[in-house]
Image: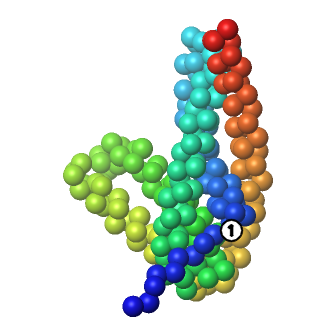
């Protein structure tokens, strides 16, 4: 019986997957914060608003770590021929697809009114559509070099913005540290 040999990603590959996972999670968090900002402005002071934003960003950073771990595990479980020299881009495809499908969960109540599904059918439809999209994107990724080129350019552009988000997270950690110290003293 042949042993199952799983791909072992390099730390640089894992960091790049993490860096790209920052983009959709942080973007969604910032959009949510901006949606609530007018009500915050009416009843909170600036320090409280900055604190709320910082809490949200730090929690999203944890979500990003979880997304990175899930995408990495799913990619490692793929056949080695699928990830041969393409671990990073394959993991990023999985992470971005999952991120987009989580948006559908967020808007589940709205979608249930528009789709011919009830609450019990939605999780199954969601899962089947996610798997179908993952298979379609992986096939495109494996068999069309032009897709790989376009996707690589997309990743290069997102890396810069994700780096800005990571610096923002560092600032948010500093804000929360100051807030914690001021509460303790």
Q: Residues within 10 Å of mark 1 (few under 14, many from 20)?
A: few
Question: Could one spot residue 7 in this view of the protein?
Answer: yes
Q: Quadrant of the C terminus?
A: top right
Which residue is at a point 54% across and 57% down the rendered structure image?
A: 69
Quick one: 181 or 44, which is closer to the camera? Answer: 181
Q: Closer to the camera, 22 or 68?
A: 68
* Residue at 71% across, 43% down: 165
Determine which quarter of the picture holds residue 140.
bottom right
Q: Name the residue rendered at 68%, 16% in the picture.
A: 181
Please, is residue 73 above or below residue 184 in the view? Answer: below
Q: Residue furthest bottom?
A: 1
Horizontal and vertical percent position of residue 167: 76, 40
* Colour pattern of the rendering: rainbow
Q: Residue at x 62, y 28 (%)?
A: 53
Residue 168, x across and y down, in percent: 73, 37
Residue that label 1 marks = 10
Q: Nearer the viewer, residue 66 or 115?
A: 66
| Residue 136 in view | no
Is residue 26 rendered to the left or right of residue 162? left
For the N terminus, the quadrant is bottom left
Indicate the position of residue 70 as horizontal and vertical percent values.
Answer: 50, 58
Q: Element at badge 1?
A: loop
Q: Position of residue 64 (x, y in %)?
A: 58, 48
């Amino acid at each position: 019986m042949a042993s199952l040999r799983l791909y072992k990603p390099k730390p640089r590959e894992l960091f790049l997957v993490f860096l790209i996972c920052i983009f959709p999670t942080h973007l969604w968090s910032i959009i949510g914060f901006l949606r609530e900002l007018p009500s915050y402005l009416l009843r909170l002071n600036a320090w409280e608003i900055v604190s709320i934003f910082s809490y949200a960003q730090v929690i999203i950073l944890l979500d990003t770590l979880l997304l990175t771990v899930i995408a990495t595990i799913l990619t490692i479980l793929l056949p080695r021929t699928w990830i041969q020299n393409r671990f990073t881009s394959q993991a990023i495809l999985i992470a971005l697809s999952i991120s987009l499908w989580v948006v559908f969960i967020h808007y589940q109540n709205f979608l249930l009114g528009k789709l011919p599904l009830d609450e019990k059918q939605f999780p199954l439809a969601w899962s089947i559509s996610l798997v179908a999209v993952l298979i379609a994107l992986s096939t495109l990724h494996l068999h069309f070099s032009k897709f790989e080129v376009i996707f690589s350019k997309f990743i290069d552009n997102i890396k810069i913005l994700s780096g800005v988000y990571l610096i923002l997270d560092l600032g948010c950690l500093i804000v929360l540290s100051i807030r914690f110290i001021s509460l303790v003293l």
